[in-house]
Amino acid sequence: MSHTKTRAGQKNILRLKYTKIDLGMQGSCQSSSLIGRVRPLFRSLEFSPVYARQCLYRGRIFLYCTPCYMSIRFTDFLVELVEIEMDVQLFARELERQHSVVRAEIAPTRHFSPDILHRTLNNILNDVDQRLVAVTMAGTSFEGETIRLIRIGKSNLSVLLWSQMHGDESTATMAIVDILRYLTMRKDDPPVRAILSSLTLHFLPMLNPDGAARCQRRTAQGIDMNRDALALQTPEARILKNLQQTLKPTFGFNLHDQELSTVGTSKELAAIALLAPAFDPLKSENDVRTRAKHLASVFAEIMKERVPGKIARYDDSFEPRAFGDNMQQWGTSTLLVESGHAMNDPQKESIRRLNFVGILSSLYAIATGAYQSFDISSYERLPFNTKKAYDVIIRNVKADYGRGRLTEVDLGVSYQIDTHSEMPPRLVDLGDLSTFVGLKEIDASGKTVPASVLFLGNAFDWEKYFS
C-alpha cells in the first residue's frame, strides 16, 4: 500500500482500489467540465458524489464522495480513481443516512425476549460467509439460557462490546443488531473494509438473558451483575471476565441505558452519557485510561453534531465492583455509553440510531488510528449528568388540605424505580418544579385534588385525576 500527501486536507492516499476510466476526452479540460463527466461514472460505480471541490492542483480534482473520500488524477485523458481515508465525521454522516436502510426489525417494542433476539440474529447471519462471521456460545446464564458471542473481522487488535448486562437495558442491543446487519451488508465498502481488516470485533449482544426475559435490571439470582466484577457470584459475570482475560481486547464498549437525566444545569434531557471509567479512587491517569478518553472524545464529537447540548458525562466516581472500572485495571481501554432519553420517543428509536452512528464511527476511528487525534477535552468538558427530569410533571395543581386551604403545586411522577421503568408510577416530588423537565407535561390549571392522595413515594394513579 503506497501513501502520498495531497494538498486537499493533506490526507494520506490509501491505494485500496485503483481503476482507470477512459473518458474519451479531446483537448484541454477545465475542472468543472471534468467533474461533470465524472459524476455519471461515479453513479454507475454505485458511488454518490456529495460535494466537489472546484479546484485543480497538479492534474488532480478532489471530490468528496460516499462511501469514501477520493481524488481523481487525469493524464492523457485517462482518470485514475484513488481511495483516500474517509474523515470520521463524514463517515458518521453517511451512517446516519444508511441507518434506515440497515435497521433490523426486531420487535414492536424495545423489550423483547432472548428467543426473539436469537431469531433476528439468525436471519441476519445465517447466510453470511462463515469466514467473515463466527457465532459461538460464550456460556450459559444462571437459568441455562445461551449467551452468544459474535466475532467479525480479522486482526490482532480486538474490541469487546457487551450490552444488556442489565436485562431491561436494550437500546444498545438493538443498535448492535443494526451494526451487524450493516457490516455484513456493506462489507465491500471501503470504511467497512478498513474496520474489518484492522479490528476483530467481539459482540455480546445480551449478557443477561434471564433479566431480559423478565424485563428486569438484575440477574435471575437478584444480583446486579455490574457490581459483581470482584466476587463473580453470577455465571454471567464469570463469562465476561473470562472473555476479557482470554481475548485481551485493547478496547471495550460497556453499553447501558441510564435513568432519566438532564445535562448539567440545563433542562435538556441527556440523550447520551459517556464515561472513561476511573481505575482507582484517585482517578489516576495511565495509557489505558487516556486511550479511553480519546475514544470518548470521538463519540462526543460525533454526538455534538447530532444532538448538541444533549450529551453528558457520567459520574466518574471509582466503583471497585463495577466492570468498567475493572476493565480499565485489567488493561482494556473501556468506554461506557449510557443511552438516555428523547422527547416523544418511548421506544428510543432516535437513541438507537445515535448508538449505531456513534459506535461504528468510533470503531472506524480506532481502525484508522484517527481516535488519537481527538482532543480529550471534548470529553472532559462535557457537563455531568443531573437529575432534573421526571417521566410526568403535572403543573399548577391545587392541593386541597381542607378547611379552604389550597396550595398551588407541581407534581413529579416517576415510572422509574431502580433506574428503569416499573408500574405503577409513583409520586416522587411535590412543590415548585419550574427548574425540572418532564417527558410528558400537563397543565392542570384550575384542577384540585385532595392532599390526602399526595403521598411521596406511593403509587399514584395520576391519570385518574388528570386524564
Image (spheres, grey):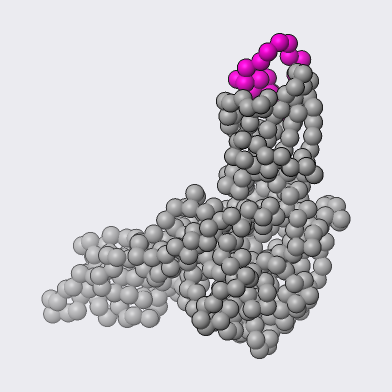
> Which part of the image, by quadrant, shows the N terminus?
top right
Q: Is residue 356 above or below residue 394?
A: above
Q: Residue at x 34, y 80 (%)?
A: 456
Give the residue at the far left of this rendering. 404
* Percent of width and height locating residue 413: 37, 71
* Percent of width and height locating residue 373: 59, 55
Q: Residue at x 25, y 78 (%)?
A: 451
> Which part of the image, by quadrant, shows the C terminus?
bottom left
Image quadrant assignment for residue 267: bottom left
* Percent of width and height locating residue 293: 56, 65
Q: Is residue 53 above or below residue 348?
A: above
Q: Is residue 29 above or below residue 219?
A: above
Residue 332 showing in the rendered view: yes
5 displayed left or right of 375? right
Characterize the magenta stretch by its predominant secondary structure.
helix
Q: Is residue 20 above or below residue 291?
A: above
Magenta segment: does it hold 38? Answer: yes
* Number of numbered discs on residues: 0
Q: Residue at x 50, y 74 (%)?
A: 316
Q: Residue at x 59, y 61 (%)?
A: 295
Give the magenta range.
23-42
Image quadrant assignment for residue 60: top right
Residue 257 showing in the rendered view: no
Q: Nearer the viewer, residue 158 or 368?
A: 368
